[in-house]
Image (tube, rainbow, N blue to C red):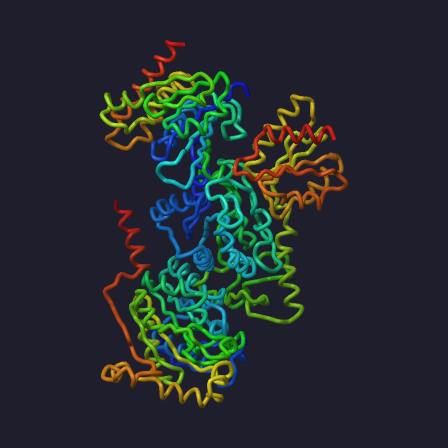
Amino acid sequence: MSKNIKLMQGNEAIAEGALIAGCDFFAGYPITPSSEVAEILSNKLPKIGKVFLQMEDEIAALGAVLGAALGGAKAITASSGPGISLKLEHIGYASMCEIPCVIINVMRGGPSTGLPTLPAQSDIMQARWGTHGDHAIIAITPSGVNESLYETIRAFNLAVKYRTPVMILTDEIIGHMREKVVIPDKNEVEIIDVKLPDVPPEKYNPYNFTSGKVTPLAPMGEGYRYHVTGLIHGETGFPSQKTDVIQNAENWLIDKIYKNIKDIEKFEEFQTGDADILIVAYGSTSRSARQAITMARAAGIKAGMFRPITIWPFPEEQISKLSKRIKKILVPEMNMGQVILEVQRNACGAEIYGLNIVNGEPITPDQIYAKIKEVSEL
Amino acid sequence: MSDRIEFRFSGSGGQGLILAGIILADAAAIYENKNAVQTQSYGPEARGGSSKSEVIISDAPIEYPKATKVDYMVSLTQESFNKYINDVKDDGIVIADKELVTDLSKAKGKLYMLDMVKSAREELGKLLGLNIIALGILVEISGAVSRDSIEKALMKRVPKGFEDYNKKALEIGFRLGKEIKNNK
Amino acid sequence: MIKTKFNYDYYLRKNTLPHIWCPGCGDGIILKALLRAIHKCGYPKDEVVITSGIGCASRLPGYVDFNTIHTTHGRALTFAIGIKMYKPKLKVITISGDGDALAIGGNHFIHAARRNIDMTLIVFNNYTYGMTGGQYSPTQPLDSYSTTTPFGNIESPFDVCNLAQAAGATWVGRSTSYHAVQLEKFMVNALNHTGFSVLDVITNCHISYGRRNKMKSPVDMVKYQKEKAIAARSAENMSAEELAGRFKTGVLFEKTDKPEFSSEYYKKLESIKTK
């Protein structure tokens, strides 16, 4: 392998990852701190014969992405908090109609316009529950630039495989910082392609709620004529108000994600083996947590980290398992307490503490170390 | 983490400080195979305001990506000097321009006042390249990367036709940096 | 070109019928005209994409055997643009009501027109939000009544065609669900046009609109269409007073020299490649 190593920004790594994954289509609307993703793809996609569109608004951007995806495109959009708030309508549509797409949220401080140029992790619950109605979603929280590239490739794969929107949640720090990235060749990474169904058009149903297998989404214009609607629909795609169809359709949207959690989940454990204190940290905060753990260990405090990389579906089982052994858990987040709610829900009898800093600066190793010390003395 | 070196370029938007940081990080990460992270902070202004660009270089993996105990800081405006000097280490080195920074009441660390603007005006004929002079100074006094690596990294990012101009700016920086080393 | 004899059954998804439209609604007439027009144009079913938003009219795609996308409220054009840009060979048609196209979807309407992207938008313009019970829409005439203008409408309505033309659409026309033959002809024109074509179709909703505006029956409403429609050519010599309360029908605007977006995009790609 000829190592192609480059110094690049997180946003650049996302664009690079998308290209390696075989992205055919980007539509977006400019917003800080995600605009570099659009700028880079506006340069690179046309050069390989693919489509870049800057739409009239955030909603239109995801609408265009979904239109292209129904045509068989691997499609992506990138935005940040205020833009994601607008996109929620179409995130729900993508969930309901099972249309694969990748949505990047380079998180900034909120609510509302908030802090356009400063980082936060306050859209974690929005990613899970933002759009109305029951649904499941996949969301991924890379902790650095290199991981942003590889997780973007994985996001495309999961989107196609499970016919679902997949969100990547980075933040202003990761999006804008520059770090070393090892760029893989296409043949070095797994890439799941959009395929035609293996049944002829007359036998094709665009949905299947009961077999447990995800039906491939036939690209429109290839002989498979079907109907797509955001109304509750049966397996043929046409609207239905039959109680059993409704229940099956709803169950399926949740089950196809949660029953495949082993395939979708991804996490890292760092020095958890003998730990007395468990830090649950993700994204850019996990970097500081790792440094703080080294500081704590040097001071004789046995701390370790559990780092969800797939944040949704939440790694409930792992938290539950670890909490049986480690009785103190600290959850540092650049928000007022979001992932801690999931930890509280899943940890068995552990004492759970939050460290919530939302001042526009990333949480520092010193801050986490101080909290570890405080918690260890309680 | 003792080998972690933290650099901070501070000034105002449009002075090319982010680019200077990128070049330094590139030299360390790509040409010397070290770990390097470059970050920046900026306000809503595309030009003006105060901005900073930080580079951390280390042999070990870099976790926290921002500078908190600054080893080397260069400052090209009074406002950024005042705003960003606070977390310079007690034995950290601060380089400021004699013309651009005049109020030294907030000074911290070891302060060196240099003729960056004057040198640029006299030797380059214009102020464009002040960022590269600053880069040359920091490379020279820190020794974090070699002259050869920084030159390669610089040439990769410089627009065609401006290679010599930038090389000259870098040389001015090396020279000014050497003067500090000799004065130490 | 499909040479076979026209047959509605070939184009209808009969398993999805009956449709949801009220007896006497004009939407069925427009649907039938659309199927005849598509047949005349000769597009293979696999190459036609129909997108729609939310509302009575937007249920149309479910009933017809093409690639059909019933999207979110107001956003049908955004999906249409996405699939058209990715697969420019496809024939893309968007069905939208007046509220869908001009209120919640107004931004997408003007920007699709500005880009002059090759697709046809058919606005089912019945002056009301029929599906939600007859609230006033952005095309509802002044002084008329709805469930949310119980004292009469004081908001000036949009003229769909003027708006489309001003925003940059390159084929603009208007007909009614009463003028079924003309309607089909205009649909053929709009579909054959290269660029963004907008056909404003005045249609009748006696249940939600007519009932509150002294047009209780479908017949009253069809009479309204017949009497108030004035051919654009005849309108040229008429005074403002004579035209008050009437609407022009015809091909109101056509322009063939404005670049079309999807072909311009792919031309640009070619020019990048050769560099």
Residue C161 location (% of width, % of height): 33, 73
Position of C165 with respect to A68 (left or right) is: left
- Left or right, A209 with respect to A120, comes to right
Quarter of the image containing the N terminus of chain A?
Answer: top left
Residue nearest the observer in this picture, A215 or A333: A333
- Residue A262, relative to residue A256: is it above or below? above
Q: Is residue A11 above or below residue C176?
A: above
Q: Is residue B35 above or below residue A106?
A: above
Q: How many marks?
A: 0
| Displayed quadrant of residue A328 | top right
Residue toward you, A25 or C210: C210
Q: Is residue B141 visible?
A: yes
Q: Is residue A216 visible?
A: no
**Which residue is found at the position 50% from the left and 20% from the top?**
B89
Q: Position of residue C266 (x, y in %)?
A: 31, 55
Q: Position of residue B6 (x, y in %)?
A: 47, 24
Q: Position of residue B101 (x, y in %)?
A: 36, 24
Instruction: Please state, as top left, top right, bottom left or bottom right, where the C terminus of chain A lies in the image.
Output: top right
Q: Is residue C40 left or right of residue A179?
A: left
